[in-house]
Image: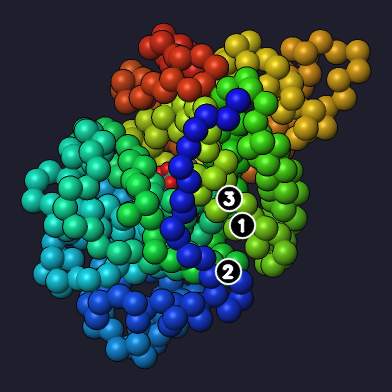
Amino acid sequence: MLGNFTYCNPTKLYFGKNALDGLAQELPKYGKRVLLVYGGGSIKKNGIYERVISILKACGKEVFEDAGVMPNPTTEKLEEGVARARAAKAEFILAVGGGSVCDYAKAVSVSVHYEGDAWKKYFIDFDEPTCPTLPVGCVLTMVGTGSEMNGGSVITNHSEKLKIGHVFGEEVFPKFSILNPEYTFTVPRYQMISGIYDIMSHILEQYFSGTDDNTSDYVMEGLLRSLIHSADVAAENPTDYEARSNIMWTATWALNTFVAQGKDTDWEVHMLGQAVAAHTDATHGMTLAAVSLPYYRHILPYGTAKFARYAKAVWEVDPAGKTEREVAEEGLRRMEAWMKKLGLVMNISELGATPEMLEGIVESTLVMEGGYKVLTKEEIRAIIKASY
Ligand code: NZQ
Ligand code: ZN
Protein backbone atom coordinates (compact mmCIF):
# COMPACT_ATOMS: atom_id res chain seq x y z
CA MET A 1 0.00 0.00 0.00
CA LEU A 2 1.24 3.46 -0.82
CA GLY A 3 2.34 5.40 2.22
CA ASN A 4 1.37 9.03 2.76
CA PHE A 5 3.45 11.70 1.09
CA THR A 6 3.72 15.32 0.04
CA TYR A 7 5.36 15.70 -3.35
CA CYS A 8 6.90 18.71 -5.03
CA ASN A 9 9.78 18.87 -7.47
CA PRO A 10 10.75 22.51 -7.95
CA THR A 11 13.37 22.07 -10.73
CA LYS A 12 12.39 23.52 -14.09
CA LEU A 13 13.77 21.54 -17.04
CA TYR A 14 14.72 22.69 -20.52
CA PHE A 15 15.18 19.59 -22.67
CA GLY A 16 16.38 19.09 -26.25
CA LYS A 17 18.66 20.53 -28.90
CA ASN A 18 17.73 24.13 -28.07
CA ALA A 19 17.70 23.67 -24.32
CA LEU A 20 20.46 26.22 -23.75
CA ASP A 21 18.03 28.96 -24.85
CA GLY A 22 16.48 28.36 -21.43
CA LEU A 23 19.61 29.74 -19.76
CA ALA A 24 18.95 33.20 -21.14
CA GLN A 25 15.37 32.99 -19.88
CA GLU A 26 16.38 31.93 -16.38
CA LEU A 27 19.47 34.03 -15.63
CA PRO A 28 17.65 37.39 -15.32
CA LYS A 29 15.77 35.97 -12.30
CA TYR A 30 18.98 35.77 -10.24
CA GLY A 31 21.69 38.12 -8.94
CA LYS A 32 24.46 39.65 -11.01
CA ARG A 33 27.40 37.88 -9.39
CA VAL A 34 27.61 34.33 -10.73
CA LEU A 35 29.99 31.58 -9.62
CA LEU A 36 30.58 29.41 -12.70
CA VAL A 37 31.50 25.91 -11.53
CA TYR A 38 32.94 23.26 -13.84
CA GLY A 39 35.23 20.23 -13.94
CA GLY A 40 38.57 19.33 -15.48
CA GLY A 41 38.12 21.05 -18.81
CA SER A 42 35.87 18.91 -21.04
CA ILE A 43 33.54 21.89 -21.50
CA LYS A 44 36.41 23.94 -22.97
CA LYS A 45 37.20 21.20 -25.50
CA ASN A 46 33.64 20.65 -26.71
CA GLY A 47 32.62 24.31 -26.95
CA ILE A 48 29.98 24.34 -24.19
CA TYR A 49 32.07 26.76 -22.10
CA GLU A 50 32.12 29.38 -24.90
CA ARG A 51 28.36 29.18 -25.39
CA VAL A 52 27.61 29.46 -21.69
CA ILE A 53 30.00 32.40 -21.22
CA SER A 54 28.46 34.32 -24.09
CA ILE A 55 24.97 33.91 -22.60
CA LEU A 56 26.22 34.97 -19.15
CA LYS A 57 27.82 38.08 -20.68
CA ALA A 58 24.74 38.86 -22.77
CA CYS A 59 22.68 38.71 -19.58
CA GLY A 60 25.03 41.22 -17.96
CA LYS A 61 26.45 38.86 -15.35
CA GLU A 62 29.73 39.26 -13.55
CA VAL A 63 31.36 35.83 -13.77
CA PHE A 64 33.68 34.30 -11.19
CA GLU A 65 35.11 30.90 -12.09
CA ASP A 66 35.60 27.84 -9.94
CA ALA A 67 37.14 25.16 -12.16
CA GLY A 68 38.72 21.77 -11.47
CA VAL A 69 35.86 20.00 -9.73
CA MET A 70 37.06 16.40 -9.80
CA PRO A 71 34.94 13.25 -10.19
CA ASN A 72 34.02 12.34 -6.58
CA PRO A 73 34.42 15.91 -5.27
CA THR A 74 36.40 16.19 -2.05
CA THR A 75 36.08 18.09 1.22
CA GLU A 76 39.24 20.05 0.33
CA LYS A 77 37.72 21.20 -2.95
CA LEU A 78 34.52 22.11 -1.13
CA GLU A 79 36.47 24.37 1.24
CA GLU A 80 38.14 25.99 -1.74
CA GLY A 81 34.80 26.56 -3.45
CA VAL A 82 33.27 28.08 -0.35
CA ALA A 83 36.21 30.49 -0.09
CA ARG A 84 35.82 31.45 -3.76
CA ALA A 85 32.07 31.96 -3.44
CA ARG A 86 32.59 34.14 -0.38
CA ALA A 87 35.35 36.21 -2.02
CA ALA A 88 33.14 36.71 -5.07
CA LYS A 89 30.09 37.53 -2.95
CA ALA A 90 28.33 35.12 -5.29
CA GLU A 91 24.55 35.39 -5.61
CA PHE A 92 24.03 32.45 -7.94
CA ILE A 93 25.92 29.25 -8.80
CA LEU A 94 25.88 27.89 -12.34
CA ALA A 95 27.11 24.28 -12.52
CA VAL A 96 28.23 23.13 -15.99
CA GLY A 97 29.18 19.47 -16.00
CA GLY A 98 28.19 16.05 -14.72
CA GLY A 99 26.90 14.85 -11.39
CA SER A 100 30.13 15.75 -9.60
CA VAL A 101 29.89 19.39 -10.63
CA CYS A 102 26.16 19.61 -9.81
CA ASP A 103 26.62 17.88 -6.44
CA TYR A 104 29.54 20.15 -5.60
CA ALA A 105 27.56 23.27 -6.52
CA LYS A 106 24.83 22.22 -4.07
CA ALA A 107 27.40 21.57 -1.35
CA VAL A 108 28.92 25.03 -1.87
CA SER A 109 25.41 26.52 -1.90
CA VAL A 110 24.58 25.23 1.60
CA SER A 111 28.04 25.98 3.03
CA VAL A 112 28.78 29.55 1.90
CA HIS A 113 26.87 31.13 4.76
CA TYR A 114 27.62 28.44 7.32
CA GLU A 115 30.55 29.25 9.60
CA GLY A 116 31.09 25.79 11.13
CA ASP A 117 32.33 22.48 9.73
CA ALA A 118 30.08 21.84 6.71
CA TRP A 119 31.31 18.24 6.25
CA LYS A 120 30.26 17.37 9.79
CA LYS A 121 26.95 19.25 9.67
CA TYR A 122 25.68 17.94 6.35
CA PHE A 123 27.48 14.65 5.69
CA ILE A 124 27.99 13.20 9.18
CA ASP A 125 25.06 14.66 11.15
CA PHE A 126 22.72 14.95 8.10
CA ASP A 127 21.44 18.34 9.31
CA GLU A 128 19.37 20.56 7.07
CA PRO A 129 20.73 24.03 6.24
CA THR A 130 20.09 26.59 8.97
CA CYS A 131 21.66 29.42 6.97
CA PRO A 132 20.74 31.14 3.70
CA THR A 133 21.62 29.02 0.63
CA LEU A 134 22.62 30.16 -2.84
CA PRO A 135 20.37 29.23 -5.77
CA VAL A 136 21.94 26.73 -8.18
CA GLY A 137 21.29 26.19 -11.90
CA CYS A 138 22.72 23.34 -13.93
CA VAL A 139 23.83 22.73 -17.51
CA LEU A 140 24.21 18.95 -17.64
CA THR A 141 26.99 17.42 -19.78
CA MET A 142 27.09 13.83 -18.49
CA VAL A 143 24.15 11.61 -17.70
CA GLY A 144 23.55 9.22 -14.83
CA THR A 145 23.25 10.68 -11.36
CA GLY A 146 19.92 12.51 -11.55
CA SER A 147 21.61 15.40 -9.71
CA GLU A 148 20.01 17.76 -12.26
CA MET A 149 16.61 17.30 -10.63
CA ASN A 150 17.24 16.23 -7.06
CA GLY A 151 18.68 17.48 -3.78
CA GLY A 152 21.48 14.91 -3.67
CA SER A 153 25.07 15.93 -3.03
CA VAL A 154 27.83 13.37 -2.56
CA ILE A 155 31.18 14.42 -1.08
CA THR A 156 34.31 12.35 -0.40
CA ASN A 157 36.48 12.79 2.67
CA HIS A 158 39.74 11.00 1.88
CA SER A 159 41.28 11.42 5.31
CA GLU A 160 38.25 9.82 6.98
CA LYS A 161 37.85 7.29 4.12
CA LEU A 162 34.19 8.17 3.72
CA LYS A 163 32.12 9.02 0.66
CA ILE A 164 28.70 10.19 1.81
CA GLY A 165 25.63 11.62 0.14
CA HIS A 166 23.13 13.99 1.71
CA VAL A 167 19.73 14.25 0.10
CA PHE A 168 18.73 17.85 0.72
CA GLY A 169 15.22 19.23 0.59
CA GLU A 170 13.46 21.24 -2.12
CA GLU A 171 15.34 24.45 -1.37
CA VAL A 172 18.60 22.88 -2.56
CA PHE A 173 17.27 21.28 -5.78
CA PRO A 174 18.59 23.10 -8.88
CA LYS A 175 16.24 25.96 -9.74
CA PHE A 176 16.53 24.88 -13.38
CA SER A 177 18.49 22.38 -15.46
CA ILE A 178 19.45 22.50 -19.11
CA LEU A 179 19.38 19.03 -20.70
CA ASN A 180 20.71 18.83 -24.24
CA PRO A 181 21.37 15.18 -25.19
CA GLU A 182 23.91 16.31 -27.81
CA TYR A 183 26.16 17.59 -25.02
CA THR A 184 26.65 13.99 -23.93
CA PHE A 185 28.05 12.86 -27.30
CA THR A 186 31.63 13.69 -26.24
CA VAL A 187 31.47 11.75 -22.95
CA PRO A 188 34.13 8.98 -23.08
CA ARG A 189 32.70 5.48 -23.51
CA TYR A 190 33.83 4.34 -20.06
CA GLN A 191 31.93 7.24 -18.47
CA MET A 192 28.91 6.71 -20.72
CA ILE A 193 28.41 3.09 -19.72
CA SER A 194 29.22 3.87 -16.10
CA GLY A 195 26.44 6.48 -16.18
CA ILE A 196 24.05 3.99 -17.78
CA TYR A 197 24.67 1.53 -14.97
CA ASP A 198 24.25 4.28 -12.38
CA ILE A 199 20.76 4.89 -13.80
CA MET A 200 19.96 1.18 -13.67
CA SER A 201 21.18 0.99 -10.11
CA HIS A 202 19.08 3.98 -9.01
CA ILE A 203 16.00 2.25 -10.33
CA LEU A 204 16.88 -1.11 -8.76
CA GLU A 205 17.66 0.48 -5.38
CA GLN A 206 14.05 1.67 -5.29
CA TYR A 207 12.56 -1.44 -6.92
CA PHE A 208 14.10 -4.12 -4.68
CA SER A 209 12.29 -3.03 -1.55
CA GLY A 210 8.81 -3.70 -0.23
CA THR A 211 6.37 -6.46 -1.11
CA ASP A 212 3.26 -4.35 -1.77
CA ASP A 213 1.52 -3.70 -5.09
CA ASN A 214 2.87 -0.30 -6.03
CA THR A 215 2.45 1.79 -9.19
CA SER A 216 6.08 2.87 -9.01
CA ASP A 217 7.25 -0.72 -9.58
CA TYR A 218 5.41 -0.85 -12.92
CA VAL A 219 6.85 2.56 -13.88
CA MET A 220 10.34 1.35 -12.99
CA GLU A 221 9.97 -1.83 -15.07
CA GLY A 222 9.16 0.41 -18.04
CA LEU A 223 12.12 2.69 -17.34
CA LEU A 224 14.43 -0.33 -17.13
CA ARG A 225 13.22 -1.76 -20.44
CA SER A 226 13.72 1.58 -22.16
CA LEU A 227 17.16 2.01 -20.59
CA ILE A 228 18.37 -1.47 -21.63
CA HIS A 229 17.18 -0.93 -25.19
CA SER A 230 18.67 2.56 -25.53
CA ALA A 231 21.94 1.46 -23.90
CA ASP A 232 22.32 -1.26 -26.52
CA VAL A 233 21.74 1.28 -29.29
CA ALA A 234 24.11 3.88 -27.77
CA ALA A 235 26.82 1.25 -27.22
CA GLU A 236 26.78 0.62 -31.00
CA ASN A 237 26.39 4.26 -31.96
CA PRO A 238 27.13 6.82 -29.23
CA THR A 239 25.81 9.71 -31.36
CA ASP A 240 22.35 8.18 -31.84
CA TYR A 241 20.26 11.13 -30.66
CA GLU A 242 17.16 9.06 -30.02
CA ALA A 243 19.00 6.67 -27.72
CA ARG A 244 21.02 9.35 -25.91
CA SER A 245 17.93 11.50 -25.35
CA ASN A 246 16.00 8.53 -23.94
CA ILE A 247 18.90 7.67 -21.65
CA MET A 248 19.09 11.28 -20.47
CA TRP A 249 15.39 11.42 -19.70
CA THR A 250 15.41 8.02 -17.98
CA ALA A 251 18.27 9.18 -15.75
CA THR A 252 16.24 12.15 -14.61
CA TRP A 253 13.14 10.05 -13.93
CA ALA A 254 15.18 7.43 -12.11
CA LEU A 255 16.25 9.80 -9.38
CA ASN A 256 14.07 12.89 -9.33
CA THR A 257 12.34 11.43 -6.24
CA PHE A 258 9.13 10.63 -8.16
CA VAL A 259 9.22 6.83 -8.13
CA ALA A 260 10.24 6.75 -4.46
CA GLN A 261 7.05 8.41 -3.23
CA GLY A 262 5.04 6.29 -0.83
CA LYS A 263 7.28 3.24 -1.14
CA ASP A 264 10.20 1.62 0.67
CA THR A 265 13.65 1.93 -0.89
CA ASP A 266 16.96 0.19 -0.26
CA TRP A 267 20.21 1.99 -1.39
CA GLU A 268 22.59 -0.67 0.00
CA VAL A 269 24.34 -1.09 -3.39
CA HIS A 270 25.24 2.61 -3.21
CA MET A 271 26.55 2.20 0.34
CA LEU A 272 28.79 -0.67 -0.79
CA GLY A 273 29.89 1.18 -3.94
CA GLN A 274 30.60 4.40 -2.08
CA ALA A 275 32.74 2.50 0.45
CA VAL A 276 34.76 1.05 -2.43
CA ALA A 277 35.14 4.55 -3.90
CA ALA A 278 36.24 5.99 -0.56
CA HIS A 279 39.26 3.65 -0.73
CA THR A 280 39.92 3.62 -4.49
CA ASP A 281 38.42 6.87 -5.87
CA ALA A 282 36.94 4.72 -8.66
CA THR A 283 34.20 5.90 -11.05
CA HIS A 284 30.80 5.86 -9.37
CA GLY A 285 28.78 3.68 -11.76
CA MET A 286 31.60 1.14 -12.03
CA THR A 287 31.76 0.70 -8.26
CA LEU A 288 28.02 -0.08 -8.32
CA ALA A 289 28.41 -2.54 -11.20
CA ALA A 290 31.20 -4.37 -9.38
CA VAL A 291 29.26 -4.98 -6.15
CA SER A 292 25.70 -5.37 -7.47
CA LEU A 293 25.54 -9.06 -8.36
CA PRO A 294 27.25 -10.34 -5.20
CA TYR A 295 24.78 -8.22 -3.22
CA TYR A 296 21.69 -9.24 -5.19
CA ARG A 297 22.64 -12.92 -5.09
CA HIS A 298 23.07 -12.60 -1.34
CA ILE A 299 19.64 -11.03 -0.73
CA LEU A 300 17.73 -13.01 -3.38
CA PRO A 301 16.54 -15.68 -0.89
CA TYR A 302 14.92 -12.93 1.22
CA GLY A 303 13.09 -11.28 -1.70
CA THR A 304 12.68 -14.12 -4.18
CA ALA A 305 9.21 -13.09 -5.39
CA LYS A 306 10.40 -9.61 -6.41
CA PHE A 307 13.50 -10.98 -8.12
CA ALA A 308 11.30 -13.41 -10.06
CA ARG A 309 8.98 -10.57 -11.06
CA TYR A 310 12.03 -8.59 -12.23
CA ALA A 311 13.27 -11.56 -14.25
CA LYS A 312 9.94 -11.87 -16.07
CA ALA A 313 9.06 -8.19 -16.52
CA VAL A 314 12.50 -6.84 -17.42
CA TRP A 315 14.56 -9.76 -18.75
CA GLU A 316 11.68 -11.72 -20.33
CA VAL A 317 12.49 -14.96 -18.52
CA ASP A 318 9.93 -17.65 -19.38
CA PRO A 319 8.75 -19.12 -16.06
CA ALA A 320 7.33 -22.34 -17.60
CA GLY A 321 8.57 -25.40 -15.74
CA LYS A 322 10.76 -23.41 -13.35
CA THR A 323 10.52 -22.71 -9.63
CA GLU A 324 10.26 -19.09 -8.49
CA ARG A 325 13.86 -19.31 -7.29
CA GLU A 326 15.06 -20.59 -10.67
CA VAL A 327 13.24 -17.77 -12.48
CA ALA A 328 14.77 -15.20 -10.11
CA GLU A 329 18.28 -16.59 -10.60
CA GLU A 330 17.93 -16.67 -14.37
CA GLY A 331 16.99 -12.97 -14.29
CA LEU A 332 20.25 -12.14 -12.54
CA ARG A 333 22.20 -14.30 -15.01
CA ARG A 334 20.69 -12.37 -17.93
CA MET A 335 21.45 -9.09 -16.20
CA GLU A 336 25.06 -10.20 -15.67
CA ALA A 337 25.45 -11.20 -19.33
CA TRP A 338 24.08 -7.80 -20.43
CA MET A 339 26.41 -5.94 -18.08
CA LYS A 340 29.43 -7.83 -19.43
CA LYS A 341 28.38 -7.19 -23.01
CA LEU A 342 28.07 -3.47 -22.28
CA GLY A 343 31.64 -3.49 -20.91
CA LEU A 344 30.99 -2.69 -17.25
CA VAL A 345 33.65 -3.46 -14.66
CA MET A 346 32.46 -6.57 -12.82
CA ASN A 347 34.90 -6.73 -9.91
CA ILE A 348 36.48 -4.29 -7.49
CA SER A 349 40.05 -5.55 -8.07
CA GLU A 350 39.93 -3.93 -11.50
CA LEU A 351 38.93 -0.70 -9.78
CA GLY A 352 42.07 -0.73 -7.63
CA ALA A 353 40.80 -2.49 -4.51
CA THR A 354 43.60 -4.55 -2.93
CA PRO A 355 43.14 -7.39 -0.40
CA GLU A 356 44.59 -5.07 2.29
CA MET A 357 41.62 -2.72 1.78
CA LEU A 358 39.00 -5.32 2.67
CA GLU A 359 38.49 -4.41 6.34
CA GLY A 360 38.57 -0.68 5.58
CA ILE A 361 35.89 -1.05 2.92
CA VAL A 362 33.74 -3.08 5.33
CA GLU A 363 34.15 -0.32 7.96
CA SER A 364 33.23 2.41 5.46
CA THR A 365 29.97 0.68 4.39
CA LEU A 366 26.84 2.20 5.90
CA VAL A 367 23.94 -0.19 6.60
CA MET A 368 20.50 0.64 5.21
CA GLU A 369 17.26 -0.77 6.54
CA GLY A 370 14.89 -0.71 3.57
CA GLY A 371 16.15 -3.74 1.62
CA TYR A 372 15.14 -7.39 1.83
CA LYS A 373 17.85 -8.11 4.40
CA VAL A 374 19.51 -5.72 6.84
CA LEU A 375 23.18 -6.68 6.48
CA THR A 376 25.44 -7.64 9.36
CA LYS A 377 29.18 -6.84 9.28
CA GLU A 378 29.88 -10.47 8.39
CA GLU A 379 27.48 -10.29 5.46
CA ILE A 380 29.06 -7.06 4.22
CA ARG A 381 32.48 -8.70 4.44
CA ALA A 382 31.25 -11.72 2.48
CA ILE A 383 29.69 -9.51 -0.24
CA ILE A 384 32.82 -7.37 -0.57
CA LYS A 385 35.00 -10.52 -0.70
CA ALA A 386 32.79 -11.90 -3.47
CA SER A 387 33.21 -8.60 -5.35
CA TYR A 388 37.03 -8.86 -5.62
O1 NZQ B 1 35.75 17.12 -15.36
P1 NZQ B 1 35.51 17.12 -16.82
O2 NZQ B 1 36.69 17.51 -17.62
O3 NZQ B 1 34.28 17.86 -17.21
O4 NZQ B 1 35.29 15.56 -17.25
C1 NZQ B 1 34.24 14.78 -16.76
C2 NZQ B 1 34.70 13.73 -15.74
O5 NZQ B 1 36.03 13.37 -15.96
C3 NZQ B 1 33.70 13.94 -17.87
N1 NZQ B 1 32.67 14.60 -18.66
C4 NZQ B 1 31.48 15.10 -18.22
N2 NZQ B 1 30.78 15.58 -19.26
C5 NZQ B 1 31.52 15.40 -20.36
C6 NZQ B 1 32.74 14.78 -19.99
N3 NZQ B 1 33.71 14.47 -20.88
C7 NZQ B 1 33.48 14.78 -22.17
N4 NZQ B 1 32.32 15.35 -22.62
C8 NZQ B 1 31.34 15.68 -21.76
N5 NZQ B 1 30.19 16.20 -22.20
O6 NZQ B 1 33.14 12.80 -17.25
C9 NZQ B 1 33.87 12.51 -16.07
C10 NZQ B 1 32.91 12.13 -14.98
O7 NZQ B 1 32.10 13.22 -14.59
P2 NZQ B 1 31.28 13.15 -13.22
O8 NZQ B 1 30.52 14.41 -13.07
O9 NZQ B 1 32.19 12.74 -12.11
O10 NZQ B 1 30.30 11.91 -13.49
P3 NZQ B 1 28.86 11.61 -12.92
O11 NZQ B 1 27.85 12.43 -13.59
O12 NZQ B 1 28.73 10.15 -12.98
O13 NZQ B 1 28.91 12.08 -11.38
C11 NZQ B 1 29.45 11.26 -10.38
C12 NZQ B 1 29.29 11.85 -9.00
O14 NZQ B 1 27.89 12.00 -8.67
C13 NZQ B 1 27.62 11.33 -7.43
C14 NZQ B 1 28.64 10.21 -7.46
O15 NZQ B 1 28.82 9.62 -6.20
C15 NZQ B 1 29.87 10.92 -7.95
O16 NZQ B 1 30.49 11.63 -6.91
N6 NZQ B 1 26.20 10.93 -7.35
C16 NZQ B 1 25.26 11.88 -7.16
C17 NZQ B 1 23.93 11.58 -6.95
C18 NZQ B 1 22.90 12.59 -6.71
N7 NZQ B 1 23.19 13.86 -6.74
O17 NZQ B 1 21.74 12.26 -6.47
C19 NZQ B 1 23.45 10.19 -6.90
C20 NZQ B 1 24.41 9.22 -7.51
O18 NZQ B 1 24.10 7.95 -6.99
C21 NZQ B 1 25.85 9.53 -7.28
O19 NZQ B 1 26.24 9.03 -6.02
ZN1 ZN C 1 24.32 6.47 -8.21
Q: CA distance from mark 1 to mark 3?
A: 6 Å
- Rendering quarter of residue 37: bottom left
Judging by the rendered image, the residue that carries numbered circle 2 is 15
The image shows residue 92 at horizontal and vertical percentages of 27, 70
Say which residue appears at 60% left-offset and 11% top-offset. Answer: 302
- The answer, for residue 344, to whether it is visible in the render is no
Disc nearer the start of the sequence (1/2): 2
Q: Secondary structure at mark 2?
A: strand
Type of amino acid at the residue the image marks with label 1: Trp
140 on left or right of 73:
right
Q: CA distance from mark 1 to mark 2?
A: 9 Å
Say which residue appears at 43% left-offset and 28% top-offset. Answer: 272
Q: Does any atom of ligand 1 lie closer than 8 Å to the CB of label 1?
A: no
Judging by the rendered image, the residue that carries numbered circle 3 is 253
Viewer-nearest residue: 56 or 386: 56
Q: Secondary structure at mark 3?
A: helix
Judging by the rendered image, the residue that carries numbered circle 1 is 249
Q: Does any atom of ligand 1 lie closer than 8 Å to the CB of label 2?
A: no
